[in-house]
Amino acid sequence: MMIREPAVAGMFYPRDAAQCVSELEACIDRALAPGPALRELDQIMGGVVPHAGWVCSGGVAAGVLREIAARKPPDVVIVFGAVHVPNVVRSAVFPSGAWSTPLGLAQIESRLVDRLCGQCGLLECDPHAHDREHSIEVEVPFLQHLLPGVPMIPVMVPVTEKAADLGAAVGRTCRSFGVRACFLCSTDLTHYGPSYGFAPHGVGPDGLRWAREVNDQRMIQLMLAMRDRDAVKEAVMNKSACGGGAIAATLAACRAFGAQRAELLEHTTSEEVLARIGCEPMQDSVGYAGIVFA
């Protein structure tokens, strides 16, 4: 059986199983309580979660996944992830086997992968593309903890115009085969500051405020409106997300699966999170949003 070993355990999240569970529970405790609009949803078909170190983004991710887990569990979670590693020019699926984490093995739904690859020419079976990528890996222990036994399908999605076509094909295929899927997007929002080489409104509080209140918000509004193709353009033009392709694929998959509405659970930044735990003011910041689709 093909096993993907962890690439960022001990960096983005704990390597030890007990510490991992403890930190997962801490993330769940930090997650905001759902509002009345969210509580009335019978089914959640997908969501958007961030993928930084758990100390920064884990609370936002936990909020989304906790809400998915509070309802009837899906048959499979299809995770569309941002691409940070080189030489991934086509959407790459990990086709079979399992991913190893401190919590054990997360199984791949290989039979559905075969169906997806047969129905969609935009997917490439490329397990090695996932070797060093962190965007999907940091979500897997959350899935194991909150949705135990539910298999997954990891798909890395570059920022291209074809991302929405891929997502739509995946959503239609799942629907036609009667698969109760949940589509999860792993992306962060604006990476702002000198460390990221992006500070069009200057270094300091004013620039960070622009990133949070203007640049992040443009992408958030597109996600809430489920405008998949516009999300790719926005990510390219304004650097408002690292996972523009993953966003587009998720939005299109959810729409093809029947989703008609979106709810924002939380929007914050690494600078805000770190300030709350007593860290010194930062020149750099990354945006995080938690969204669900129903």
Image (spheres, grey):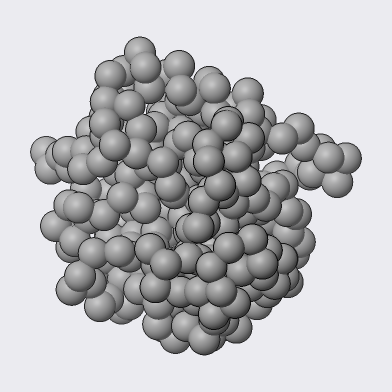
In the rendered image, the quadrant that contains the C terminus is bottom right
* 106 vs 26, nearest the viewer: 26
Identified at 45% across, 36% down, the residue is 54
Q: Is residue 6 left or right of residue 26?
A: left
Relative vertical location of residue 57 with respect to residue 200 in this rendering, above or below: above
Relative vertical location of residue 210 with respect to residue 66 in this rendering, above or below: below
Identified at 59% across, 77% down, the residue is 201
Seen as rendered, the residue at the extreme right is 36
Location of residue 65 in the rendering, given as x and y in whole percent from the top left corner: 57, 38
* 35 vs 53, nearest the viewer: 53
In the rendered image, the quadrant that contains the N terminus is top left
Location of residue 97 in the rendering, given as x and y in whole percent from the top left corner: 20, 42
Image quarter of residue 194: bottom left
Q: Is residue 244 left or right of residue 71?
A: left
Is there any visible trace of residue 78 in the rendered image? no
Is there any visible trace of residue 100 in the rendered image? yes
Relative vertical location of residue 280 with respect to residue 212 in this rendering, above or below: above
Identified at 25% across, 78% down, the residue is 89
Relative vertical location of residue 294 with respect to residue 162 in this rendering, above or below: above
Identified at 34% across, 39% down, the residue is 12
Q: Is residue 1 left or right of residue 48?
A: left
* 176 vs 293, nearest the viewer: 293
Location of residue 141 in the rendering, given as x and y in whole percent from the top left corner: 39, 32
Seen as rendered, the residue at the extreme top is 18
